[in-house]
Amino acid sequence: MHRMVIEAPLLAKKVQPGQFLIIMADEEGERIPISVADWDASAGTITIYFLEVGVSTMKLAQKNAGDGLYAVVGPLGRPAKLAKYGTVVMGGGCYGIGAITSIARALKEMGNRVIVITEARSKYLLYNREALRAIADEYIEATSDGSTGIKGKVQDVVQYVIYREKVDLAYFIGCTFMMMNCSNATKGKGLRTLVALNTLMLDGTGMCGVCRVNVGGQTKFACVDGPEFDGHQIDWLGVFHRKSMYLQEELLAYQYHSCRALRPTDQEGK
């Protein structure tokens, strides 16, 4: 998991909680959407978190302080729907631990009681802990191996929380599987549930249609209609199918580029 602070003064003045950027690491790189975790308008910076899982994120991870990015486009997507709901449960996993930060802060500033739940396979994969502790009224960690906090996942903790007290809104950001499980955990309990979808994208402005999803029986574009949607209305099977279309090619490309990055050049080999 990597944290990157990008100097982008114009974007830092415009971005709102829940929006995302499309980033190209270099001229030959693909365009990838990454949620904005935080920003500082006075310093002119935007903060993102990403997990190295493919060629593009590998290229981002290899950047050093002072390096440039070929393109940073944004802010994109609709801002999060912020209001005074009452008690809000926010769950984050993987990159979503960072992505929920600005939304949680904004909801807290509006007078909501904010309960933050984060998950990881193990304690060492958790991050941004102090920032979320400072924001949340209650901060709960869940780990698959039980190395810290509650043993389990966000969906397990959510069920405990909504049994314990009245919750007015649930909001989840993380991998598709995590968001689906959390949405299923709140379904049928009269709890409004929002998620931020992380679909495949190209232009991020609604022109290409790559990010289309089925929500409540209607076709929506995650980039311009979202990324925030009702988790109970999403055709999750369709989301999984579209996201896995190029999985084999992505894995092969990552292996190839990883080996190439480690392989000495012809000159070095001599």
Image (tube, rainbow, N blue to C red):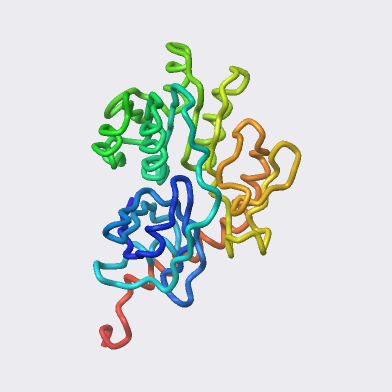
Where 83 falls versus 2 (above or below)? above
Where 131 falls versus 164 (above or below)? below
Of 201 and 61, nearer the camera is: 201
Of 1 and 6, nearer the camera is: 6
The spot of residue 187 in percent (x, y) is 60, 23
Of 263 and 74, nearer the camera is: 74
Q: Toward which corner of the image does residue 237 lie, by quadrant?
A: top right
Where 189 falls versus 27 (above or below)? above
**Number of numbered discs on residues:** 0
> Who's the residue at 51% across and 26% down the image?
169
Of 148 and 161, nearer the camera is: 161
> Who's the residue at 35% across and 57% down the image?
46
For this orientation, the residue located farthest to the top is: 164
- The quarter of the image holding the C terminus is bottom left
> Who's the residue at 38% across and 48% down the image?
37
The spot of residue 217 in percent (x, y) is 75, 39
> Who's the residue at 69% across and 40% down the image?
215
The spot of residue 222 in percent (x, y) is 61, 50
Tell whether 30 sits left or right of 120.
Answer: right
Q: Toward which corner of the image does residue 181 lie, by quadrant?
A: top right
The spot of residue 107 in percent (x, y) is 41, 33
Q: Toward which corner of the image does residue 124 lie, by quadrant?
A: top left
